Amino acid sequence: MRVPLKDSTIDLTVVIPTLNEGPNLEQLLPLLIAALREMNVAAEVLVVDGNSADGTRAITAREGATYVLENEPGYGAAILRGIAEARGAYVLTMDADQSHPADVVRTLWAVRDKADITIASRYVPGGKADQPLGRLLLSRILNGLFGKGLDIPVKDLSSGFRLYRKTVFRRLDLDFTNFVVLIDILLKGHALGFTAQEVPFHYRPRGAGSSKARILKFGRDYLRLFTRVWKIRNSVSFPDYDWRAHNSRIWLQRYWQRTRYNIITRFTPPKVSTCDIGCGSSHILAAMPHAVGVDLRHDKLAFMRRTNRLLVQGDGMQLPFGDDRFDCVISSEVIEHIPNEGGRHIDECTRVLKPGGILVLGTPDYARWEWNVLEWLYKKVKPDAYGDEHVTFYTFASLSEALRVRGYEILEHDYVGRGELIFKARKGGAS
């Protein structure tokens, strides 16, 4: 689900999801609006309400905020509706129950330029939570579970007191309309290269009324949804899959990624103009900050912005570069994914490579029993992974011949796990 966004015409929109929080809104809204005026920021306040029966609409109008009726149930639905309605370049979300102090809005706004998402956190140094022991322990456990299990570098994942650059939501495809939307935003944002920071705040008990989240049901729902989110996180389609595989807890996966990394970086000449085709989110590209990374998927390139600046979305069958452009071209784990490849990708690599330049080319060797056994096991263990995407099958003999007929001199070759073949070859025609 993508959030449709309005054009930004003001600086800040504050979104407050509510359900029968009228008495608390009477206390919060005057303090919040006064704080926004003191900050001298062009702002609006949206109260996104689930059709409360306690006068919330009248209170909102009286205090000078904007009332938005949201009929779809769920905290996440209210948050996403508020973001869709927001006219601010930044969007701040906060609870209506007075547990999120209005004066902390100044703190979040003051550091807005340092990250794409700023979180008011209970669990960083200086943060504090005045909560019943059971709720505090549950919150700590859930944040620890999701943080480690999903590999998100945030301490307080479940804090809804946040400031976002609204443009973040143009690229997020979100799955949840309940409280888990908070984790979904951070997970998808992290994978796309958006930055997050945490600032400490003191969480205090709610004012009037009772919490909408019942502690046992809340914890049960989070745990139930953890499996679903974990599957999304660890899918091969997730943008940073290759990056995380380099440090995987699974020995074979870690070995395969790191051995490929060692061979390719050893074969690649240092500090020459280099193009990594099908770079994905690999540590190989990160090891060469001068290299140009090319990939079809924009989200993988967005993730790699943290290490590389020269990134191009493009097709390995029609590279957006002139002839004889690079001293080195890397193509690893690409040609086996191209139907009826027929050497066309190798031709394109050759076109952009300078005479005398180095081609580093890798693909599974389907003449080796080791690879065929491994691929069969991989399909059984991880049926949603890359196994069924291999449609063109090279061997040592056929790939050697494909290089030789194009005038290459094969300098070296090596294997990852006696199954994945990697060549280092020099293009002919050097003067």
Image (cartoon, rainbow, N blue to C red):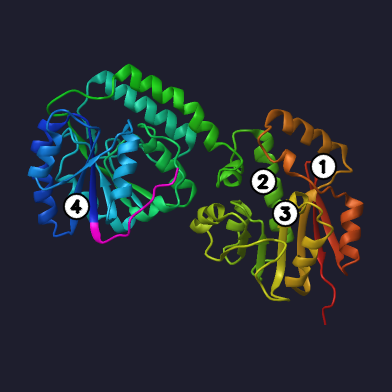
The residue closer to the viewer here, 20 or 115, is 20
Mark 2 Cα shell of 10 Å, populated few (<14), some (14-19), many (≥20): some
Q: Using the image, determine if residue 386 lies above or below residue 179.
A: below
The structure residue drawn at horizontal position 62% and vertical position 61%, both measured from the top left corner, is 294
Looking at the image, do the residues carrying marks 3 and 2 touch, with CB atoms under 8 Å apart?
Answer: no
Q: Which label was assigned to residue 44? A: 4
Which quadrant of the view contains residue 16?
top left
Main SS, magenta region, reads loop
CA gap, disc 4 and disc 2: 50 Å
Q: Magenta span covers which residues?
A: 1-11
The structure residue drawn at horizontal position 23% and vertical position 60%, both measured from the top left corner, is 10
Name the kind of residue labelled 2 in the image.
Arg
CA gap, disc 1 and disc 2: 14 Å
Q: Position of residue 163 (x, y in %)?
A: 29, 48
The residue closer to the viewer here, 32 or 144, is 32
CA gap, disc 4 and disc 1: 62 Å
Name the kind of residue labelled 1 in the image.
Arg
Q: Specify whether residue 195 is in view.
A: no
- Classify mark 1: helix, strand or loop: loop
Q: Where is residue 195 in the image (x, y as percent from the top left)?
A: 40, 51
Name the kind of residue labelled 4 in the image.
Glu
- Classify mark 2: helix, strand or loop: helix
CA gap, disc 3 and disc 4: 50 Å
Which quarter of the rendered picture does the C terminus lie within? bottom right
Camera-side mark, 3 or 4? 4
Name the kind of residue labelled 3 in the image.
Ser
Farthest bottom residue? Answer: 431
Which quadrant of the view contains residue 165?
bottom left
Residue beneath disc 3: 332
